Image: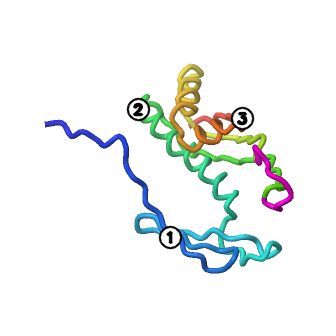
Amino acid sequence: MAIKLKTTVKMGLSAQSETHARMRIAARDVQSVIDEPEARGGTNQGLTPTETLMSALMGCTNVISARIAHKMGITLDGMEISLSADFNRLGTMLEEEIEHPFTDIVMEISVATDADAAQLAALQSDLAKFCPIAKVIRGSGVTITENWTVRPL
């Protein structure tokens, strides 16, 4: 008998404020800290909330790309991502509501692969379809640009 995977699952996380700027996050059996730098009243023990969002995008890009490559039967190895984002801080400074705090996100993605140009294009297309973090960000009206550099295996 084939096992049918659940297509929708409920995520559960909890958070406990440790200071006005630092929060401990628990998910499954792991914990993380979200904090502000000392210059903004934090203790610099973790990524800021906005850095956490951007790191989630990079992590999702890595995981979903690897899943797509596996499904396609190609090798994808040693992914490196650097990200830059235009971030309008007027909202976080409580100056004015900003519809799109991030206007442009650019990811420089370097990877070693045996994929040919057509396979890489298909992987990139599927990544845009299946990475949930990128889908949410793009759905909010933010542009994400991915610049891929391929290294030989």
- The label shown at residue 31 is 1
**Mark 3 or mark 1, which is nearer the start of the sequence?**
1
Residue at image point 69% right, 64% down:
48
Q: Is residue 147 left or right of residue 87?
A: left
Pinpoint residue 75: horizontal percent, then vertical percent.
Answer: 48, 35
Residue at image point 53% right, 41% down:
132
Q: Are marks 2 and 1 in contact (CB under 8 Å)?
A: no
Q: Please, what secondary structure does the residue beneath circle 3 have?
A: strand
Question: What residue is pinned by disc 2?
Answer: 71
Residue at image point 57% right, 50% down:
59
Q: Please, what secondary structure does the residue beneath circle 2 have?
A: helix
Pinpoint residue 5: horizontal percent, then vertical percent.
Answer: 29, 41
Disc 2 versus disc 3: nearer the observer: 3
Question: What residue is pinned by disc 3?
Answer: 145
Magenta: predominant secondary structure element? loop
Query: Image quarter for residue 107?
Result: top right
The amino acid at mark 2 is Lys
The residue carrying pointer 3 sits among few (fewer than 14), some (14 to 19) or many (20 or more) residues within 10 Å by Cα, namely: few
The amino acid at mark 1 is Gln
Magenta range is 92-101
**Mark 3 or mark 2, which is nearer the start of the sequence?**
2
State which quarter of the image contains the N terminus.
top left
Q: CA distance from mark 2 to mark 3?
A: 24 Å
**Mark 1 or mark 2, which is nearer the start of the sequence?**
1
State which quarter of the image contains the C terminus.
top right
Q: Is residue 152 magenta?
A: no
Q: Nearer the viewer, residue 81 or 53?
A: 53
- The label shown at residue 42 is none
Q: Please, what secondary structure does the residue beneath circle 1 have?
A: strand
Residue at image point 69% right, 58% down:
51
Pinpoint residue 134: horizontal percent, then vertical percent.
Answer: 60, 40
